[in-house]
Each structure stands twice: as C-alpha cells, then as structure tokens.
Image (cartoon, coloured by chain):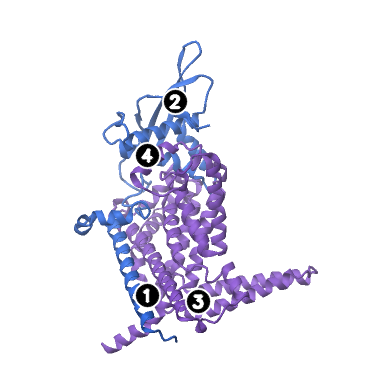
Chain colours: A blue, B purple
Amino acid sequence: MRVWSTPARVVLVVAGVGLGACVLAFLGALFLHVAPANSVSKEYRDQVDWVVYPEFEQNWKLFAPDPLQRNVEVDARVQTIGADGQVATGAWHGLTAGDWAAIRHDPAPSHLDQNLLRRAWDFYESTHGEGDAQAPDGSRGRMAERYLERIALQRIGPGGDRVIQVQLRATVTSVAPPAWSREQVDTAPHVRELPWWPVQAEDRRGLS
Amino acid sequence: MTSAATAVRAALPRLLTTLAPYQAAVVRIGVAGTWGAYLLREWPHRRVLYGDRSPWSAELNDRLLADTHAFTALSWSDGRWWFEAVYLLALLSAVAVAAGWRTRASTVLFALTVLSLQNRNVFLGDGGDNLVHLMAIYLVFTRCGRVWSLDARRRARRPGRDPSEWGEPRAVADALAAMLHNCAMLVIAVQVVLVYAAAGWYKVQGTRWQDGTAVFYPLKLGYFTPWPELSGLLGGSLLVTFALTYGTVIMQVGFPFSLAARRLKNVLLAVMVCEHLAIAVLLGLPFFSLAMVSADAVFLPTAFLLAVRERLAGRWAALRAGRRTSGAADGTGADGAAGVDAGAGTAVDAGAGGEPVGGRGD
C-alpha cells in the first residue's frame, strides 16, 4: 500500500473532512425537505430552501397520502367573429378525451398526452383555490390561465374565422369505490365552468 | 474500543479507492438509457413539449425562471434551431453516457441538457423525470465509466503506468477523485432511500392505504389506464387489491431498514423491480418505472452484476464465434473477441477494490 507524505496526508484529510461535511449538510437538507414540516425544518427553512431549490426539488408523495380518486375532464370552446361581424360560439372540444384516446393501448404514452394538460390543470387549480376570477397580473395564477388558454387554442386549432374568446370547463367525477366496498360516494359529475378569456393575436404565437 | 479504532483505521484507505464501480456503471447505463429512450419516443412531439411550439411559451417560462433561477440553456434563445440543436445534443449525450464514451465530459453535457429540457417546462414531468434530473447531476461527480464502458475498453487496450508507479501528485489527485466518487455514490444511495421512505411513510397516513383499496383507484383513472380491460381485471379482486396495497406500503416503509440485512434487501429489490415493471405496463408509465429501476440498481450486489455480465459476455462471444465459423472471417470477429477479453480483465481488476455501497460484503 502507498505511504503518503505529510503534505499529501494533510490534503487528503482536509478534503475528506470537507467533502464529508458537504455531503452531510446536503443530505440533511434533502431529509428536512422531504420530512413533514417540523421544528428543525421551520428553524432552518431558508438554508434548506437554498440547497433544494431549484435543482434538487423532490416530490415523492407518489399516490400518497391517498391516490387520486377523481377523474377531471377538461373541455374547451371558442367564440369566433366572421368577416361580416357575426359572432359564433363553437362546440365543446374534449381536450382530456383526446388525451385518453391517445393513451389507450399505447405501451409508452407521450408526456404530451399523459402530463401536459393534466399538470396544467393541476397548476391552475393550485393557483385558483378561491374561484375562477382572473388572477392578478404577473402572478402564478395568471401564468396558469395563459398556459391553459394556449393549450386550448393549440388543440382546437385555427379555424376559418378569427377567435375572439376561449372558454374552458372541467367535469370532475369521483371514482366509484370497488364493488365489495359498502362506502357511498357521490359519483355524479360536477362541472366547473371557467369565465370566457379574451384572445389576442399574440396569444397564438408559436402555436401552429 | 481500540479494536474499533483499528478497524476504522484499516477501513480509511479504502475510502481513497473507487468503491462500487459496477453499481455506478449500472446506474449510468440505466438513467442515460431511460432518458435517451424517452427523448426518442418524444421526438415527434419535441417542439410542443420543450420547443418553439410549446403552449408554455418562452415568455411565460422566462417569467417563472426569474423567480426560480433554474438553469436552462433553452432560455438563451427561443429560436427553433437552437432548440433542435439542444435536443439533438441531449440525445447524443444520453447515448455517450450510456456507452461510457468520454464519460466525465459526457455526463456533464448530459446533466446540462437534462436540466435544459426539463426546466424549459417544469409542468411536464412526473416522478421519473424528477429522478432522472437528480441522478444526472449526481452522476457528474462519480467515476461511472470505470467498468462496462468504451472508456474502460480503451484503457484496457492502451494500459498506462501501474498506479503503484505514480508520483505522489497524481496519486493524490486520483484519491481525491475517488473520494468524490464515493460521496456521490453515497448521495445516490441515500436519495433512493429517501424516495422509498417518503413514499411509504406518507402512504401510511392515507385512509385508502389503510382500508386496503388504494391500488384500486389509479386503475380507474383515464390518464393511467392504457389497458382498461387489464386494469379492471386486477382491480376487480378484493384479495389482490388488498395484498398489493398493503404489500406496497410494507415494502416501501421497510426497504430502508432492510439495508442492514443483505438477503432481505436483495429480496425486496427483486420484488420492487417486479412492481415497477407492473406499473410500467398497467399505468402506462414505462419511463418512470425504468428510471426507478435504474436508481434501485445502486443496491444490486456486485456478485449478481458480475454474473449477469458473464452471461451476456458468454452469449456475445458465442454469437461472434458462430458468425466467424459461418464464413464471415474478415477480422471483425477476432477484434470483438479481444475487446471482450480486455473488458473481463478490467472487470476483475476493479472488482478487487470494488464493493457495493448498499450491501456490505455482497
């Protein structure tokens, strides 16, 4: 085995202690981030956030504490104005229905079908707890609105007439409990209709 | 007390050597392979997911980035061709990392491209993407190209000086790199433990996991039922649903503790790999499952990995030999056989100092 000189030993020990301390601090921060909010993670919140955000974020509550027990189906429709000034409201397009159809019998579903709209809606819901009124300018809520609006416009596609407004609605249906369960669950669909959002030409940028 | 001290003193020099080279290689191949396959699968949709046609426009993302300070090279320009170049680079670096070509440099490029794409739209990913993101960063600090890589093959063909003949500066540099590698491997192992511990302990609190029906519900979600007939069949049985629900929680909560018992750990690993394969098919999450299995591989025993390698090498050699005897003796066969031999040589060499992070004494 190699015999190290004193300077080499110093370098190795210093490096070892330094690396060990860094690893401990890093793993400690990850642990506190993953653990339920506790006295330590509250006290050192800034330090933990400094380590974890933006690149070491973790969300491992996979299907926990409870799995999702409801299906959300998002539909969208547009209002167009013709050359003669006639305003027409189009039919509802099943955006989620399209996703589900694409996923069916696909062994490797695309994130386009499985995650894009689903997570955009989650984003919207998480920023619109109090209702569907327009969120303040520059807020996350407004970003979620713009994102959903653009998803709808992209999927409906450019029709003949100019689109002036777009509207979304979400139909939420609870999954019925298994046949052997005696639990009573309301499985009637609940519809959440969002307000009409005005559409400008620049809102379509890059979509087609 | 003194015997413990001597044991520690004896163990210390080992920390200056590259531990768990096989586990590092499997994680590298698994993670890069998963991400590479994912990028290929999304090739037709790449511009809508991460590029110039994304409904999550560059302006929207710029506003978010100003808040989060996440890294993405895609914010440097929102033009189409810059995006195409980054996507192609991401694909090429995934191939390079999986093959272990110029591994250190390609892992850096791999991590940067993974971050660039994922941070272009953070509202796209699932747990699998999150895991690839983390592993891509950790792999940069490992010596994951020590074995089972093009780099290892090249080193075996053109061996340098024996490490015992190195001057001290080089030996110190080598020991420092080994220490960094060992730390990164520890981080990877703890990260996997954190994933399961968090997933398990949060489930314990859920009423659905307690009443034994939790597994039933995802099988009824439109987004996670590519095979509704199959999902209906599985979710239709009370006993199967109960066993899977309770089994999942017990496994996830128990996995961290099983690391103290080698045999139990290996059994749980095998069960977890099977569960992930089932998730891949039933819930339509193949890339998520592949990423999880790749990360789990950090806990696979060295003996098992070597045995798998032996079998694959045997098949490969037999294939080569078969082709040679069938008349295609143009020199490539002999060349390939030499490569296999050389690879086996490095495997044995590195194996002497290598031990898995997870299972001591495997």
Task: Choose top left, top right, bottom left or bottom right for residue A202.
Answer: top left
> Which chain does the numbered disc 1 sit on?
B
Callout 4 touching callout 1 (CB < 8 Å)? no
Q: Residues within 10 Å of mark 2 (few under 14, many from 20)?
A: many
Does B37 sit above or below residue B124?
below
Write down the residue under mark 3. B303
What's the amino acid at mark 2? Arg
Q: Position of residue A135 (x, y in %)?
A: 30, 32
* Contact? badges 3 and 4 (CB < 8 Å): no
Q: Mark 2 = which residue?
A: A77
Q: What type is the residue that disc 4 sits on?
A: Arg
Report, in whole angstroms, how far the alpha carbon at label 3 lies from the one at label 1.
Answer: 16 Å
Q: Secondary structure at mark 4?
A: helix
The residue type indicated by label 3 comes to Ala
Mark 3 vs mark 1, foreground winner is 3
Q: CA distance from mark 2 to mark 4?
A: 27 Å
Q: Residues within 10 Å of mark 3 (few under 14, many from 20)?
A: some
Where is residue B280 drawn, in percent x and y? 49, 54
Q: Which residue is mark 4?
A: B63
Query: Which chain is home to disc 3?
Result: B
The answer to whether any part of residue A176 appears in the image is no
Tell me the SS state at disc 1.
loop
Q: Find disc 1 in the rendering and name its residue.
A: B261
Mark pair 2, 1: CA separation: 59 Å
Query: Mark 4 or 1 closer to N-term?
Result: 4
Marks 3 and 4 belong to one chain: yes
In the rendered image, residues at marks 2 and 3 fall on the same chain = no
Which mark is first along the chain, 4 or 3?
Answer: 4
